[in-house]
Amino acid sequence: MEAQNIQVNHCAVKKEKPNTDQLEFGTVFTDHMFIMDYSEESKWHDARIVPYQPLTIDPSSMVFHYGQSVFEGMKAYLSSDGDTQLFRPEKNMQRLNHSNDRLCIPQVDENFVIQAIKKLISVDQDWVPEAEGTTLYIRPFIISTESYIGVAPSAHYKLIVILSPVGAYYKEGINPVKIAVENEFVRTVKGGTGEAKTGGNYAASLKAQEIAGHKGFAQVLWLDGVEKKYIEEVGSMNIFFKINGEVVTPALNGSILEGVTRNSVIQLLKHWNIPVVERKISMEELQQAHEDGLLEEAFGAGTAAVISPIGQITWNNNDFLINGEKTGEVAKKLYDTLTGIQYGREEDPFGWVTKVKDGVTKIAQ
Ligand code: COI
């Protein structure tokens, strides 16, 4: 499949755009979406851009019953020179195929999907928001659409990409959030689907998230599903701690999502010669570090959350207040540098950014 063959069916009437100074996360969607279908006979086919619209799907479609689905989260940024750019989209596509493999969903042509996303963004270019801290969030997802209620991998799928102009993920914006350590529920276990970006992991997180939310926490911190001892991740971001000058993040173990922002943070820290290590870290160790005054910073990293400083971690009714509940130096430097690269304000030493227009052949209007 070639990106220039993607058919574009433009919407007749464009929607009214939201005020970009008051954008929330994930509530508004653009005028168009990308779709392609999969069948065993035709493989991935019929790639098209159509007006954003509800789907007509049979109630017996397998996705409704057994949750065979995967998704990704990416962003497009409007740079100061007026270009729209993507951040490491190839990493998202690699992860999409990794998730596909775990969920028995057929592999996609990673380069083709990136080209399709670029083409979709070009069609909806006027939706890329301009206000500081806003972006166009990109949500590619795949659902199983075979009409069958036996438990088996589906023979049919749809890959869809929708776009949403967004502001900050947390209501706190870039101010420190409060996180509750989850002792009762588990999100996933090694050998489960934790490493895949699949809806079931997020469904499994809702109960704990709801309880924590009622107590005023922004998110929960998940522990390993077997011993409930080792720190894994926060539901919408990976986690980092600065302990006695060294940055520590839980090592990937099969149940932690391999975040693109996580990987970028590690590369940036190494580039700056700030010690960083990926290893197991237990709550006991974190508590000890806090008691000894060595827990200097905590922050989350994710596409939606960017770099989100953590001001308080609560475990067994003990509140660990971190860095006086203020954004730490390392978190601030990471936030400024990452967003600087993403919005084209800073040099991109790693070649992480790709311009949307570089991948788009002329779009039929
Ligand atoms: C992202 O960071 O893009 C995510 O997918 C997290 C989320 C909003 C579920």
Image: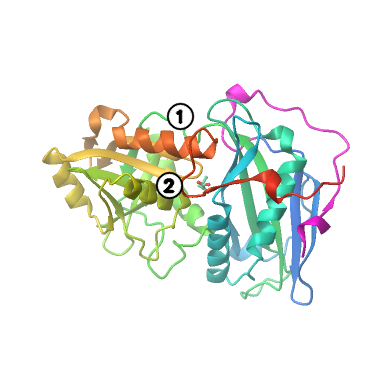
Figure quadrant of the C terminus: top right
Q: Residue at x 44, y 57 (%)?
A: 257
Q: Are marks 2 and 1 in contact (CB under 8 Å)?
A: no
Mark 2 residue CB less than 8 A from any atom of ligand 1 = yes
Residue 215 visible at all: no
Q: Residue at x 45, y 53 (%)?
A: 259
Q: Quadrant of residue 114?
A: bottom right
Is 95 contained in the magenta span? no
> Magenta stretch containing residue 11, yes or no?
yes
Q: Which residue is mark 1?
A: 173
Amino acid, disc 2: Met
Q: Give the Cα distance between marks 2 and 1.
A: 15 Å
Q: Is residue 338 left or right of residue 186?
A: right
Q: Residue drawn at (47%, 65%), measured in percent from left and top?
A: 193
Residue 203 position within the rendered picture, expressed as x and y whole percent measured from the top left: 51, 53
Q: Main secondary structure of the magenta part?
A: loop
- Bounds of the magenta span? 1-27
User: Which secondary structure lies at badge 2?
Assistant: loop
At label 1, the amino acid type is Gly
